[in-house]
Image (cartoon, helix red, strand yellow):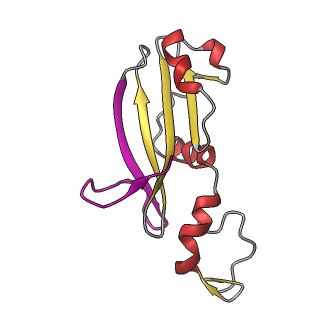
Amino acid sequence: MDFAYVGTGRKVAGRLFGVDMNKRRAAVSRRVEVGTLLDSFLRSRHYVPPDARRIRSQEELPLALQSHTQQVDGVAWRAWDDGKRILFVKARRASCEAAAGLQVMFFDMDARLAGSGIWIWLKDRGWVLSDPTDVMTISS
């Protein structure tokens, strides 16, 4: 999926209504919801085991993880139970030049941060881990 074109109308020969898409790509990608980006990232990385059950309610989570589900603008969480453990991921937008970016955080069942990274969506490569030396900002 090219997130530059999500919700933007029709594409005409690489341009949107006569506007150069390179100039519009960052602005448009900001309008894509964090949850949609996170779902795309998780599918592309095959993070969720096929038999895992999606957890949609914070009450189904261990108490330690419930604090990570508080409603905050620009933050999305996803969780699954695979029968042995709870998989819990949280993300917020990361601003980067001309691409959709996410700071993705993985937590263990005790709500300890197990890993994180900034991933960016590149049309020709999909989700790639950002070079930590790149200058990016995390939206709050």
The residue at the point 59 percent across, 60 percent down is: 30
The residue at the point 29 percent across, 61 percent down is: 134
131 lies left or right of 123? left
The residue at the point 63 percent across, 19 percent down is: 58
104 lies left or right of 7? left
Residue 54 screen position, x and y as percent:
63, 24
Q: Is residue 80 above or below residue 90?
A: above
- Residue extending furthest toward the right: 9
91 lies left or right of 4? left
Quarter residue 130 falls in:
bottom left
Instruction: Judge whether residue 127 can be spotted in this image.
Output: no
Q: Is residue 40 above or below residue 27?
A: above
Asked if the stretch drawn in magenta spans residue 115, the answer is yes
Q: Quadrant of the N terminus?
A: bottom right
Asked if the stretch drawn in magenta spans residue 58, the answer is no
Residue 55 screen position, x and y as percent:
63, 22
Residue 126 screen position, x and y as percent:
46, 58
In the foreground, 8 or 71: 71
Instruction: Judge whether residue 82 can be spotted in this image.
Output: yes
Residue 52 screen position, x and y as percent:
57, 22
In the foreground, 105 or 54: 105
Quarter residue 115 falls in:
top left
- Residue extending furthest toward the front: 140
| Span shown in magenta | 113-140
The residue at the point 32 percent across, 61 percent down is: 135
- Residue extending furthest toward the left: 133
Quarter residue 110 falls in:
top left
In the foreground, 20 or 73: 73
